[in-house]
């Protein structure tokens, strides 16, 4: 955030699935946004709002049909450059555990580094590190078949497979969906550690507003393919009425503050965490006595 | 893109063709296919092509759908045409070393091309305008007289419904997998045949694993709702013939008769 060059710049991006058929869906409609180097940028929106379609533009998987996308200064419409983008932008797909295919966990995580043409030692080093980042030990599960692991473990292995690319930008499409609360928190902690250690930019697609409140620097709200809101979590979660109209909610502390305000209490409504909420409540209790 | 392969995928609509009884469409398609194969001269071809064109226009689906359906088969079209053009003996038009294009070759090639294109169009007309469930209901009802001979009509129809239902889902899944593995640098086709086989593993292993999981879930879900096979099943919609069905059946019969008759002109 000290360095304010946009790593990803999207200008007036529009995407239509199956154009010209009865199945036509406008999944992105004139999106413009900038993601800065080193920040954690969250993307929220109800199901089908176009989040996945948008992030798949970031590593060249989908070519921009209308509008422009620059990633690390490279114009993505250039086909040859687009093809090499996967080395810079690691994209963890939705439900990535369904993409495991190798016989052992080690081979699966090594798939990306091997495709980069790295040497044996380098591959080993990266696999070890990537597994460590998601809290797994190579000696314990390296030789196990990924199909024998639990769903949550498989998810972590799949994420390690992308981390092993050592990307400059890490894009995560609902990485914690379907995990238990502790698994969720741990996974997000792993991601944040990785971010601080390597200084990578993180784009996080999520349905958890608490996660956004706690971890994001900025957040964009998609609605039916359009950019409905954008700003810091504090700014966005203060617009509770608009958010609810889009089928979204605010984190519980912010919701509580809005209720208190509606009941005539003079509290700040732009709170994000439970601690901030406690301070506000303590304040009005102090006033009352 | 894989999921943009629309051949055979049902497209909702409200045309006459969409509203016909599925049995009419099955019989009609068989009759038109027979006419395509029976056509021997330009009168015959004009009759079938005319009928097919009317049906295509009637379906009110965008031309793009049909063109992309035809395009999926262009390799087969091209190969058969070229083989015919070069290998049919007759009056030589042009030569390229031992390869010679003959007048007769061009004619046979053209005829075969026309036949294949018409067959593809007619077949796609059926599946484009009929929801899989209705198609299965139609086939089941047409096969049911064979039940007494031990033909499992209901089971066949159910298998077909499920298979047709799974095709778009699997295509969608395959597309996601291609994208996901490409994000890790997968090059699916590299080197010789061995490289090909190895390169496709990242696609097919998860695809089959997913298909098996789905199949298991579906079986559980069906049993949980007391599905026990054909014996006591009834359909939500019963099939009924209307005036348009009789008109369409008569029309296809007339065309078939016309085509057969034109052979003797
Ligand atoms: N391969 C595809 N073919 C056709 N339409 C698609 C395809 N993928 C997505 N869509 C459509 O595009 C729209 C946006 O989908 P997208 O997957 O980007 O949404 P999303 O915000 O990621 O939703 P979710 O929270 O459910 O993951 C949806 O209406 C969806 O039906
Ligand atoms: Mg999504």
Image: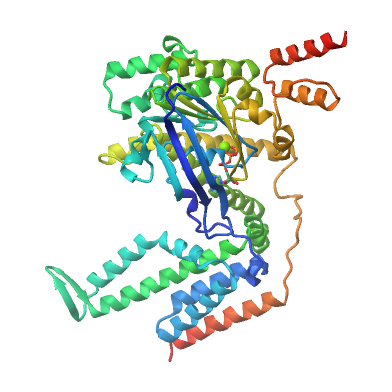
Q: How is the image coloured?
A: rainbow
Q: Is residue A80 above or below residue A97?
A: below
Q: Position of residue A177 (x, y in %)?
A: 60, 27
Q: Residue furthest right?
A: A289
Image quarter for ligand 2 equals top right
Locate the C terminus of chain B and report the quarter of the image it occupies.
bottom left
Q: Position of residue B255 (x, y in %)?
A: 54, 82
Which residue is more in the foreground, B79 or A29? A29
Q: Is residue A172 above or below residue B3?
A: above
Which residue is more in the foreground, A136 or A201? A201
**Residue A143 appears in view:** no
Q: Residue furthest left?
A: B97
Q: Position of residue A162 (x, y in %)?
A: 43, 26
Rendering quarter of residue B100? bottom left
**Horizontally, is B93 left or right of B256 in the view?**
left
Which residue is rendered at x = 64% and y = 25% of the image?
A234
Which residue is rendered at x = 32% and y = 26% of the image?
A114
Count of residue discs: 0
Which residue is rendered at x = 31% and y = 69% of the image?
B81
Q: Is residue B211 above or below residue A285?
A: below
**Residue B202 appears in view:** yes
Which residue is more in the foreground, B255 or A256? A256
Q: Position of residue B230 (x, y in %)?
A: 71, 50
Q: Residue furthest bottom?
A: B265
**Horizontally, is A116 left or right of B43 in the view?**
left
**Horizontally, is A222 left or right of A74 in the view?**
right
């Amino acid at each position: 955030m000290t360095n304010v060059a946009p790593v990803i710049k999207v200008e007036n991006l529009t995407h239509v699935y199956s154009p010209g058929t009865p199945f036509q869906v406008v999944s992105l409609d004139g999106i413009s946004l900038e993601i800065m180097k080193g920040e954690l940028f969250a993307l929220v929106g109800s199901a089908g709002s176009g989040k996945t379609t948008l992030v798949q533009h970031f590593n060249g998987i989908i070519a921009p049909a209308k509008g422009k996308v620059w990633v690390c200064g490279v114009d993505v419409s250039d086909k040859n450059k687009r093809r090499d983008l996967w080395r810079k932008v690691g994209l963890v797909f939705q439900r990535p555990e369904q993409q495991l295919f190798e016989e052992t966990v080690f081979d699966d995580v090594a798939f990306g580094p091997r495709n980069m043409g790295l040497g044996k030692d380098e591959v080993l080093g990266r696999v070890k590190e990537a597994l460590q980042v998601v809290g797994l030990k190579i000696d314990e599960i390296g030789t196990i078949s990924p199909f024998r692991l639990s769903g949550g473990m498989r998810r972590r292995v799949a994420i390690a497979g992308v981390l092993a690319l050592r990307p400059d930008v890490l894009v995560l499409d609902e990485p914690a969906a379907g995990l238990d609360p502790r698994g969720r928190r741990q996974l997000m902690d792993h991601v944040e550690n990785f971010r601080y250690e390597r200084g990578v930019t993180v784009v996080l697609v999520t349905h958890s507003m608490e996660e956004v409140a706690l971890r994001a620097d900025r957040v964009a709200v998609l609605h039916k393919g359009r950019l409905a809101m954008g700003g810091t979590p504090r700014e966005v979660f203060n617009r509770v009425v608009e958010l609810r109209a889009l089928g979204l909610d605010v984190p519980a502390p912010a919701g509580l503050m809005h209720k208190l305000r509606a009941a005539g209490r003079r509290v700040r409504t732009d709170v994000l965490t439970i601690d901030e909420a406690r301070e506000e409540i303590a304040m009005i209790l102090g006033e009352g006595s | 893109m894989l999921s943009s392969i629309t051949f055979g995928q049902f497209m909702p609509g409200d045309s006459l063709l969409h509203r016909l009884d599925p049995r009419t469409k099955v019989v009609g398609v068989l009759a038109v296919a027979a006419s395509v194969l029976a056509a021997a001269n330009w009168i015959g071809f004009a009759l079938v092509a005319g009928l097919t064109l009317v049906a295509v226009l009637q379906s009110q689906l965008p031309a793009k759908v049909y063109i992309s359906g035809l395009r999926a088969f262009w390799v087969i079209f091209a190969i058969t045409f070229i083989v015919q053009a070069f290998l049919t003996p007759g009056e030589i038009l042009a030569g390229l070393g031992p390869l010679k294009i003959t007048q007769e070759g061009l004619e046979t090639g053209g005829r075969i091309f026309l036949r294949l294109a018409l067959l593809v169009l007619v077949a796609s007309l059926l599946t484009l305008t009929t929801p899989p469930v209705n198609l299965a209901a139609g086939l089941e009802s047409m096969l049911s007289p064979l039940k007494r001979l031990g033909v499992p009509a209901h089971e066949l129809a159910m298998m077909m419904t499920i298979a047709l239902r799974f095709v778009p889902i699997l295509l969608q899944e395959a597309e996601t997998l291609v994208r996901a593995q490409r994000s890790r640098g997968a090059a699916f086709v590299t080197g010789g045949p061995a490289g090909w086989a190895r390169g496709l593993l990242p696609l097919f292993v998860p695809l089959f694993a997913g298909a098996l999981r789905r199949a298991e879930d579906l079986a559980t879900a069906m049993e949980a709702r007391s599905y026990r096979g054909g014996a006591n099943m009834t359909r939500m919609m019963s099939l009924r013939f209307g005036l348009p069905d009789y008109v369409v059946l008569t029309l296809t019969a007339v065309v078939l008769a016309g085509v057969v008759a034109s052979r003797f002109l």
